[in-house]
Image (cartoon, helix red, strand yellow):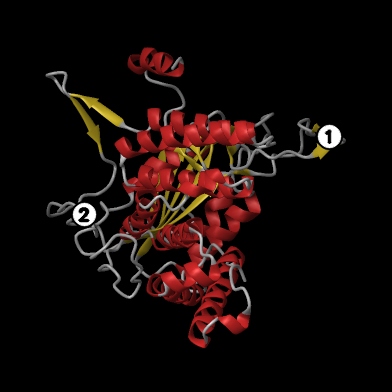
Amino acid sequence: MTGLGAEDDIPLGERKTVTDFCYLLDKSKQLFNGLRDLPQYGHKQWQSYFGRTFDVYTKLWKFQQQHRQVLDNRYGLKRWQIGEVASKIGQLYYHYYLRTSETSYLNEAFSFYSAIRQRSYYYQVNKEDRPELVVKKLRYYARYIVVCLLLNKNDLVTVLVKELSEEIEDYTQRFNTEDQLEWNLVLQEVAAFVEADPVIVLNDDNSVVVMSNRLQEGGVPQLEQGMVVGQLALADALIVGNCNSQVKFSELTIDMFRMLQALEREPVNLSAQTNKPGTLEPSEKPAKRENPHKYLLYKPTFSQLYTFLSASFKELPANSVLLVYLSATGVFPTSRSDYEGPYEYGGVLTNTNRDVVNGETVQKRNQAQKEMHCLHPGDLFPFTRKPLFVIVDSSNSTAYKNFSNLFGQPLVCLLSPTVYPKSMQACARDYGRR
C-alpha cells in the first residue's frame, strides 16, 4: 500500500481505515468488471448484480469522503483516483439508464461527470509520466460528451469537445502513441455528430427553432374519442443501426440517437432534489415513468439480433407491443426466382463484417448464397405472434412492402421512401457537401 511506511508507526485505527478502503476499492473493481459478463438482454437477470455494485460504490464514495485526511497521509490517495471512482459511478448510472430507459439516471451520470470536471480530479494526470492515466482522462471526456448529447446540452458539448481536442493534442505530443489516429477519429466523429444532431425548423418569420425529439412530461397526448383501438402499450424497442457512411459517435448513429429520444420523456431535473453534486444515493430513486425498454444494437450480427428479438418476445408483457426499428443499408436480390417469397426481395444488412482470407476481404458470393447478416421480412414472421411495430429506414425498405400478418395480431410496418422527394433533393445535395 502506498505511503504506509513502517506499520509499527501507524495507529491501529488508521491502519484499519486504509485496510477497509483497500477492500472496498478491490471489491468495487471486481464487481464493476463483472458487469461486462452480464447478459445485455432480459429485464431481471442483471438487477441484483447492479444493486450489489451500487451498494459497494456507495460505501466506497462515502468512505473516502469521511476519511480523506487519513487516506491522503497513510495511503497516498491521489485526486485522479477519486476521479476514477466518480467516473465509474457515472458509468454505472449511464448503463443503468441504458437498461431501464429511465432518463433521470442520465442526470445522475451527468452530476458525477460534472463534479469530476468542476473539482479538477484529473488535473494532475497531465503532470505524471503515465500515458495510461491520460487515456483514462480522454475516455472520461468521451463518456461525458455522450451523456451531454443525450441530455441535449449542446453548448456544454461544444466546450467539452474543445477541451478534449486540447487534451488529445497534448497527449499525442508528449507520448509516442499508436492510438493517435484513433483519438483523432473520435474528434471527427463527435464534430460531425454535433453538426448533424439539431433538428432545425425555420418559421415563416425566418426564426430558428431547435426541435426536441423527446416526449414532454405529462405523458402521451390525449387521444380523441374513437381513436383508441384496444389497450396496447409499447413495452420494448430494438433500435438497430448499420448504414454506410452515416454520422455516428461511439456506437450510436444519428438515426439511432433520434429514435431512442423519440421513445423517451424529457429527463426529470434532479439537481434541485440533491443537496450536493457528486453524491451517490441510489436508494432515493426517482418516481418510475413508463418509458419503453430499449436495446441499442449497432451493427449486430444476425445471431445477436435474433437473440435480442427472442428475449424481448419472450418477456413482452400482455397487451404490449414490440417495436423494431431498422436503419440499415439495403440488400437487393441478385436474381429473380420463379417463386417470389419473403426471402426473394432482399432485406436490410445488419452487420457489414465479411469473411477474411489471407488478409483479403471476401465479397464474392455464389449466386445461390444469400447474405448471412441480411434481415429478410420472413425472419420477423415468428415474432408476429404478438403485436409488432416495424419501422424500416433503408434503401431497400420496399422488401418489406408485402409483410404478411400470419397470426392475426396487430401489426404495423412503416417503410421509408427509397429516394428523396424532388423538393428535397437540392437540400440533400447541399447537406452532403458539408
Residue 139 in view: no
How far across and down, in percent of the image, does residue 282 sit? Answer: 35, 71
| Left or right: 3 in relation to 269 | right
Q: Is mark 1 on a helix, strand or loop?
A: loop
How far across and down, in percent of the image, does residue 413 sit? Answer: 41, 44
Q: Residue at position x 52%, y 42% from top?
A: 250
The picture quadrant where one finds residue 152 is top left
Q: Select label 2 or label 1 by which is in front.
A: 1
Which residue is more in the foreground, 194 or 403?
194
Q: In which quarter of the image is the C terminus?
A: top left
Q: Residue at position x 21%, y 54% from top?
A: 220
| Left or right: 55 in relation to 346 | left
Dot 2 or dot 1: first in sequence order is: 2
Residue 309 in view: yes
In the rendered image, the vertical position of residue 13 relative to residue 378, given as above or below: below
| Left or right: 152 in relation to 20 | left
Provide the residue designation for mark 2. Answer: 220
How far across and down, in percent of the image, does residue 207 sit? Answer: 16, 22
Mark 2 to mark 1: distance in Å? 52 Å
Provide the residue designation for mark 1. Answer: 359
Q: What residue type is labelled 2?
A: Val
Q: What residue type is labelled 1?
A: Gly
Which residue is more in the foreground, 20 or 289?
20
